[in-house]
Amino acid sequence: MLKTFRITAYLEGLSFLVLLLIAMPLKYVWGMAMAVRLVGSAHGALFVAYCIVGAMVWKQQKWPLKIACLAFISAFLPAGPFIFDHKILAHSKND
């Protein structure tokens, strides 16, 4: 389950960066609103998956509440899931 969470975190973090750095400039500079609609939808689905899988890993790994909160908060920060992975997940018990 931890491996699944790490993959989900990577995809969620990547989708957030694509949304911020590619899709939003396409919309606001070049008027291509469809870019935000497509990438935003994918990012939203990945965010929900990140939260669900994160809750499952929290229970399975018996993380303290502090770690679970850091995982959730990291999803709201650009590159947050990557930092969380590097600092916390890389040192957690494996599946």
Image (tube, helix red, strand yellow):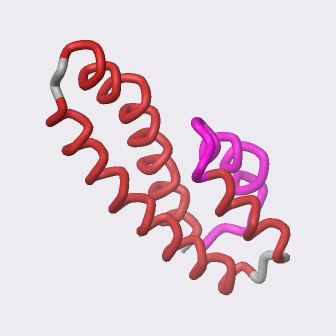
* Depth check, front residue: 13 or 85: 13
Residue at the location (20% across, 33% down)? 35
Q: Quadrant of residue 78?
A: top right
Residue at the location (34% across, 28% down)? 24
Q: Position of residue 77 (x, y in %)?
A: 62, 42
Residue at the location (37% across, 35% down)? 19
* Depth check, front residue: 27 or 87: 27
| Magenta-colored stretch includes residue 39 | no
* Depth check, front residue: 25 or 63: 25
Total tally of numbered discs in the picture = 0
Q: The C terminus lies in which quarter of the figure? A: bottom right
The magenta-colored residue range is 75-95
Instruction: Using residue 38 as the reference point, say whether residue 4 is left or right of it.
Output: right
Instruction: Using residue 90 as the reference point, say whether residue 79 is left or right of it.
Output: left
Q: Residue furthest top?
A: 29
Q: Quadrant of residue 28?
A: top left
In the figure, 24 relative to 29: above or below? below
Q: Position of residue 20 (x, y in %)?
A: 43, 30
In the figure, 12 relative to 21: above or below? below
Q: Position of residue 64 (x, y in %)?
A: 84, 76
